[in-house]
Image (spheres, rainbow, N blue to C red):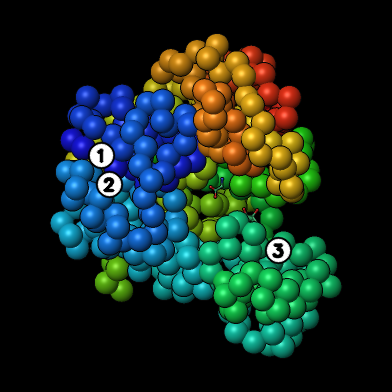
Amino acid sequence: MNILILGGGGREHALAWAVLQNPKCDKLIVAPGNAGIAAIADCADLDILNGAAVVNFCEENAIDFVIVGPEAPLAAGVADRLRDAGFLVFGPSEEAAKLEASKSFTKEICDAAKAPTAGYGHFTDAEAAKAYIREQGAPIVVKADGLAAGKGVIVAMDEDTALAAIDDMFGGEFGSAGAEVVIEEFMEGEEASYFILVDGETCLPIGTAQDHKRVGEGDTGLNTGGMGAYSPAPVLSDEIAEKAMEEIIKPTMKAMVDRGTPYQGVLYAGLMIKDGQPRLVEYNVRFGDPECQVLMLRLGAQALDLMQACAEGRLADAQVNWADDHAMTVVMAAKGYPGDYVKGSVIKGLDTLPETSSEMCFHAGTGEKDGQIIATGGRVLNVTARGATLKEAADRAYAMVDRIDWPEGFCRRDIGWRAL
Ligand code: AMP
Ligand code: GLY
């Protein structure tokens, strides 16, 4: 089977690594890829937001199966163009990708499905939005409706911050994503992520994870794309996961079928858990990054079989074979991230790291220059390990971190602290 993966971050390196464990994979191309991916697969320079260009590329390279990593191509309808051209694709249609691309759409689907989530108002007018905030009071959460690269959510602990967020969003700070806002009730509790494969009809859970969004130790400082993650997430016990499946996931997936836009791909449910009750914070229509890295390390070769079964509508007969293990990934970022950071610093010591089925250093923002690996992004490496316990996974991951010689990089030393 010839496979194309779209994307070029740590998530796609982990997907590529897992796909290559499976003997079914004859050829793997990743577009655009990165320096770590280039060491294990062919990388192609391709505009992955251009459906026609991706279809052309698949025809020229005899691709049998396309796995879409990030949300942007999905929201741009690339999966639709590929399916129209007869290709097998893992990833939802543009209409179904609205579960991530539009917060108000997701709230309407939750209403239709009676799924537990935060109460909300949806506004296209700044004055009406402000009146709602004054009426509800703080804490309150203001969200730009569209995709905003993880920066469109303001959790306001006081009313002034919420009102200022409205001015920013209607003032164009978030581009067209802010022309509409959703204002939500503030939910207390502990957050966890639940990953489910959906083939339109059948929902198959493939794991739980928790990530660390803040840049600083003890979960302090600015928000980031994620500084580390671990799986499983103990807060999402079997009982609570089952509740989330029956009360949230299945009803919303049925609502998608009922409106004629069934969902196909991985569904990433962000849940808030309090007193044993899960509520939906958000849906994403892709794997989390870096959560994918821990899930792929735990799943290994079967990940390809599962994604293929999902794309072919065969999940009813599929099953996940779980090792009773734990995985952790530690993100190494360029100093200064998530603010300004320097690009181009050289990373050494990567060739001394173990590369086994239990230990992998996935690359996110890396490139190659004069035979050396250099940092090209904010989040740069995802040092990932698994073990019989979370402690063992953490010890292995940090032992790898300590072998990496990159003075311009940093990581958090407390990934997994809640569970440890
Ligand atoms: P989102 O992009 O919707 O996941 O929001 C980003 C983060 O904001 C979430 O991971 C939560 O930590 C927080 N958040 C979003 N909505 C709420 C809410 N209604 N109550 C409390 N925290 C929230
Ligand atoms: N790690 C959070 C995300 O992928 O959205």
Q: In terms of sequence position, does the residue under pointer 1 or pointer 2 come before the other?
A: 1
Q: Quadrant of residue 154?
A: bottom right
The amino acid type of the residue labelled 3 equals Ile
Residue at the far front in the pictured view: 370
Of helix, strand and loop, which one carries label 3? strand
- Please tell me which residue is depicted at 74% across the width and 82% down the height of the picture: 130
Q: Which residue was labeled with disc 1?
A: 3
Q: How many marks?
A: 3
The residue drawn where x is 59% and y is 30% is 374
Query: Residue 17: x percent and y percent?
Result: 38, 28
Residue behind label 1 places its C-beta within 8 angstroms of ligand 2: no
Whereabouts is ligand 1, in terms of quadrant? bottom right
SS class, disc 2: strand
Q: Which residue is mark 2?
A: 66
Is disc 2's CB within 8 Å of ligand 2? no
- Judge left or right: residue 341 versus residue 45: right
Dot 1: what SS?
A: strand
Tell me the residue at 78%/81% (across/down): 134
Depth order, front residue of 264/31: 31
Q: Are marks 1 and 3 in contact (CB under 8 Å)?
A: no
Who is closer to the viewer here, 252 or 163? 163
Quadrant of the frame with the N terminus: top left
Whether pointer 1 and pointer 2 mark residues with C-beta atoms closer than 8 Å, the reply is: yes
Give the residue displayed 38% in from the left and 54% down from the top: 48
Type of residue at label 2? Val
- Tell me which numbered mark, 3 or 2, is placed earlier along the sequence: 2
On the image, the x and y values in percent for residue 162 come to: 76, 71
> What percent of the width, then of the height, locates residue 220?
78, 43
* Residue 109, label in figure: none
Determine whether, in the image, residue 101 is placed left or right of residue 396.
left
- The amino acid on which the numbered mark 1 sits, given as a three-letter code, is Ile
Measure the C-alpha gap from mark 1 to mark 2.
6 Å
